[in-house]
Image (cartoon, rainbow, N blue to C red):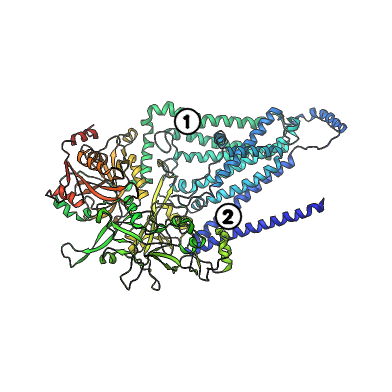
Amino acid sequence: MELSQSPWSKLFRIIVVLLGVWLVYDLASHLLVEVLWFLEVQHLPVFLKRFQTQLIVWVIVGGISGFYLLGNILLARRNKHFQPQKINREIKANLILSARLEDESAEENTFRGRMNLIILLILVTGISILIGLMLIHLGKEAVVFWQRDLTLPSVTPLLPAPFELALAPKLWQEFLEHTWQVIVLVIAIFLLLVNAELWLGTIAVGFSLLFGLILANNWAKILLFLHPTNFQEKDPVFGLDLSFEVFRLPFWQLGDFWLGAMFLYAFLAVLLIYILSANSLSEGKFPGFNRPQLRHLYALGGTVMLAQALRHWLSRYELLFSKRGVNYGASFTDIKVQLPVETTFTVICSAIAFWLLLRALVSFRIKRTTLLPLYALGFYAIAAGLCCFLLPAAIQRLEVQPNELELERPYIERTIAFTRSAFALNDIEAKTFDPRGQLSAKDIEANELTIENIRLWDTRPLLETNRQLQRIRLYYEFPDADIDRYRIKRESRTKPEIIESEKQQVIIAPRELNYAAVPQEAQTWINKHLIYTHGYGFTLSPVNQVGEGGLPDYFVKNIGTGADEGEEGILNTSSDLVNQSIPIGKPRIYYGELTNTYVMTSTKVKEFDFPSGEDNVYNSYDGIGGIEIGSVWRRLVFAEYLKDWRMLFTDNFTPQTRLLFRRNINQRVRAIAPFLRYDRDPYLVTAKTGDDNYWIQPNYLYWIIDAYTTSNYYPYSDRGDHDFNYIRNSVKIVIDAYNGNIEFYVADPEDPIINTWSQIFPQTFKPLTEMPLSLLEHIRYPLDLFSVQSERLLIYHMRDPQVFYNREDQWQIPQEIYASESQPIEPYYLILKLPTESSEEFVLLHPYTPTQRNNLIAWLAGRSDGENYGKLLLYQFPKQKLVYGPEQIEALINQDPVISQRISLWNRQGSRAIQGNLLIIPIEQSLLYVEPLYLEAEQNSLPTLVRVIVVYENRIIMAETLEEALEGIFAPQPLETPTIIRELENIAPTVEKQSGVGD
C-alpha cells in the first residue's frame, strides 16, 4: 500500500513546491515592478512608506489574531469533555453505576447547564449561522481590496462595517437575497457540524489573514492617526479639536471592527467546541460545563464585553454625525438622552467585563449561582435595546417633535455653521446685484473683451464636429474638450502696426489614439504594444468665432506640414500670430485619458506617428518615460507581472527598449496618491515651461488634474448626497503628456489634511509657487468642487435657524433646454468683468432660482486668475424685483411664434435644431442672455452654428451672428441679413405672474 502511494505522494510534493515557487515568483515580480515604476515617476518614498505600513499592520494584526484565535481553540480542545471511542458493555455499566453514586457528592461541582436535543440543536445551529455570517461579512469587506476602480474620483476604501449581533437579522435578510451567499453559508454550517475543531481552526486562520488584509488596506487612516494636524477648531459637544474626529476616530473604529469580531469569534468557536464535545449531538443531550470550561468562557465573555464597552464609547462621538432630527449631527435627543445612555452603558459593559474576567482568574466553587453571568448578560441585552433604541425614539417623538424648532434651534445653528465651514461656504463674499437695464451700445463697446468671449460653442457640439472633421483616422479619438484661456497675439484695433496680446477663451481637445478603434484584423500583438503607441496633437478653437458654413473657426487643427523646410507633423495654425501664441513643438500624447495599453518603445519596429497623405510617418520615442526592459531578467519579471509571455520570445527588443505602462493619467495619479479625491475632468494645457531638452524636439503638452482632500468625519457637517462632508481643493497635479512625469503642488496650504500628508510624504508635495508660471496661468476653479459648493449653498445660504427650519428661502438649480430636452444648468466658464471689478477675468458661473419659482435669485462666481484664484463671489438679486430666470427665458424663446416656427422647419426629417447652453452674462449693472442654436443631421452628426439668440430686458432677437444680434438690440439699423426681434412687453406681465414675485 505504501509503495502504491509513494509516486502520488512525490507528485503531490512536487506540485506543492512548484506552486510555492510560482507564488513567490509572482509576489516578487509584483513588488519589483512596483519599485521600478515608482522609481520611474520619482515617487518611490510614497510606495516604500505605504508598503512598510501595510506590511507591519498585516503582520501585527494577522499575527495577534492568529495567536489569539488558534490559542483559544487549542485550549478548548484540551478542556473539552472526554469522548470515549469504544467501551464494552461491562465497563460502561460500571461507569454508569459509579457515576450515579458520585452524582450526589459532586452536585456542587457540576454546572446545571445541561441541554436536551432541541435546545442543543437550536444553539449549535445559531452559533454556526453566526460564524457563517461573519465569514461572508469579512470576505465581502476584504474583496474591496481587489476591486478598486482607479477611474473613480475616490479610491480610498471606506471603513469596514463592524459585525454586531444586532445586525445579524439584517445581514441574514441580505444574504437570503443572494443564492451564492446562502450556498456558502449552508456549506459552512455543514462543515462545522461534521468536524468543528478542524474547520473552526481553518476559519480562524482565514479570519486572521482577513483582519490583517482589511486593516492593511486602511493604511492611510493609520498614517493619519500617527501624524495629526490640529484644525484649531473644537467640536461643540466634547470640546476636542476637530483633528480627533477627522484623524483619530477612524483609527479607533478600525480597532473596534477588528477586536469586536476577533473576540466574538473566539467566544463562539470555543462555546461550539465545548457544546459539541462528549458526543452531544449523537447522545441527544449536553452534560454541562466543567470548571475549566467555565473559566475559559468567562474570560472570553469578558473580552466580548470589553469590545462592547469600546463600541458604546465610540458611539458617543459618532453622535456628531447623527441623522436623527431635522439637522445633521447631534440633536436634542442625541445630547440629552443618547449621549448619557451610551456613557452609562460604557460603564456597565466595563463593569460586566471586569467581573467576568475576575471570575475567570479567581478560583470558585460551581453552584447554581453560576447562572448569574447569564442573567447579567440578559439584563444588559434587554436594557441596551430599551435605552439605546426605544427610549431615544420615544423622546424624539413625544417630546421633541411637538416642540421641534424651540428645542433644536441651537443644534440647527451648529449644523449651519459647521456645514458652511466644511464646504468653505464661509469664504464666499456676498454682494447685492440690482440689474438696472440701462445697457447701451457704448457699454457694449466698453466691455469688448467680455463680448468677444461670449461662448457660442459648447464642448458637446464641438466634439461632434471634431469627430467628423479632425479625427483623420478611425483610431484617433477626442475623448473630451475643455474650456481654458490663452493669450493670443493680434493686431491692435486702433494701430494695426502694433501687436498686442489679449486673453481669449478657447476650447482645447486632445487627439488621442484609441486602440479599440483599430480594425479587428489589425489588432495584433506588435500593433498593440509596439506600433500604435501614442496620439498626436490637439485642436484649439475660440469659443466665440464661427467659420465657413457655421463650423468652428480653429486656431489649431489638422496634422500638416511645417513651414520650415517642409517639416512634417506640425499642426496647422490659422495665422503666424497664433503660431507665436500657442506653443506646439512635437505634440505626441503618450500619456492621456485613453492610453489604456502598455507599450514598448525604442524597439526595432518603428512607431506609427501620424498619417501623411496615402502613407504613414513613423517615429521612435526619445523621451525619458518608461522602464528599461532590455535585460532578460527584467523581461522575465514584467512578463509575469503583465501576464504577457510573448515579451520573452520577440526579436524586436533592443538593449534600449523601454516599457511604458500605467499610461492612463487617471490610474497613474491614483496609483501614487490613492488617499486624494480627483476631479472628473482633467484638462490639457500647451505651454512652455522652461524645461526643454535641446537635443530633442520639445513637447509642450501637459495635463492638469485637480485633487481634493476629503473627510466624512467633520462634526455637524451635512454631507447631503455626497460620501464626504468636508472638502478642499488642496492639490494641483501636472502630468507631462510625453514623458509621464508627475508633480503634486499644494494649492491650499491652510488645509490640515494636506498638511498631514505633507508631513507623511515630504518629498511628494511642492508649494504652488514652484509651478512654472506658464502652467500657473492655466489653473482654474475646479468644476467638481464648484458643483458641490453650489449644491450645498442651495440650503446653507440660510443662516437664520427659523428660516432654515421652515425652508423659507431655499434655492434650486434652474433648468435649461438643450437638444429639445430639459436638464439642470451646469456651471460654465466665462471671461467677463464682474460687477464692481475693473478688468476681465476667467470665472466659473452658476445661477440660482427660488424653489417653486423661476425668477433669478442669485448667481455664484468662482474666480481663477492671479491673486483672486479660489475666491467665491455670490451676487444676490432683490427679491422684490423680477429678474428673468433661465426657464423663463427659455419659455420666451420657445413660445415666440417666429422663432418656434423657424426651429420647427429645421426639425424636419433628417435634421434637428439644438438649443445650446443658455448663458447669463452680467455686463455693468445689467444681464444679457445668450443662447446659440445649432443644426445637425440625425446621422453622421456635424453640428453647425446657424443662429444666435440674444435676450435683453423686454427684447428678444435671433440673428446669424452675435454681432448682428447685439447690433439689432443696442444699435437698431437695417441689416443685410434679416433678424427676428420680438418685444416682450405684452408677455412680461404673464411671466411676472408665473414667477411668483410678490407672493
Counting from the top left corner in percent of width and height, residue 473 is at 39, 59
Does the image show residue 475? yes
Could you give the CA–CA distance between mark 2 and mark 1, rounded to whole angstroms?
42 Å
Q: Is residue 305 visible?
A: no
Question: Which structural element holds mark 2?
Answer: helix
Measured as percent of width and height from the top left, residue 573 is found at 29, 64
- The kind of residue on which mark 2 rests is Ile
Indicate which label's residue lies in the foreground, 2 or 1.
Answer: 2
The x and y percentages for residue 269 are 66, 40
Q: Give the residue number, with chain letter if any, for mark 1.
A: 392
Relative to 632, is 114 on the left or the right? right
Q: Nearer the viewer, residue 614 or 707?
A: 614
Q: Nearer the viewer, residue 184 or 393?
A: 184
* Residue 831 circle label: none
Q: Residues within 10 Å of mark 2 (few under 14, many from 20)?
A: some
Q: Which residue is farthest left?
A: 973
Residue at image mark 2: 56
Whether residue 174 is situated above or below residue 227 in the rendered picture: above
Relative side of 8 to 759, left or right: right
- CB under 8 Å between discs 2 and 1: no
Name the kind of residue labelled 1 in the image. Answer: Pro
Seen in the image, is 643 located left or right of residue 688? Answer: right
* Front one among 408 and 982: 982
Q: Earlier in the sequence, mark 2 or mark 1?
A: 2
Quadrant of the image for the C terminus? top left
- Please tell me whether residue 283 is drawn above or below residue 73 in the rendered image: above
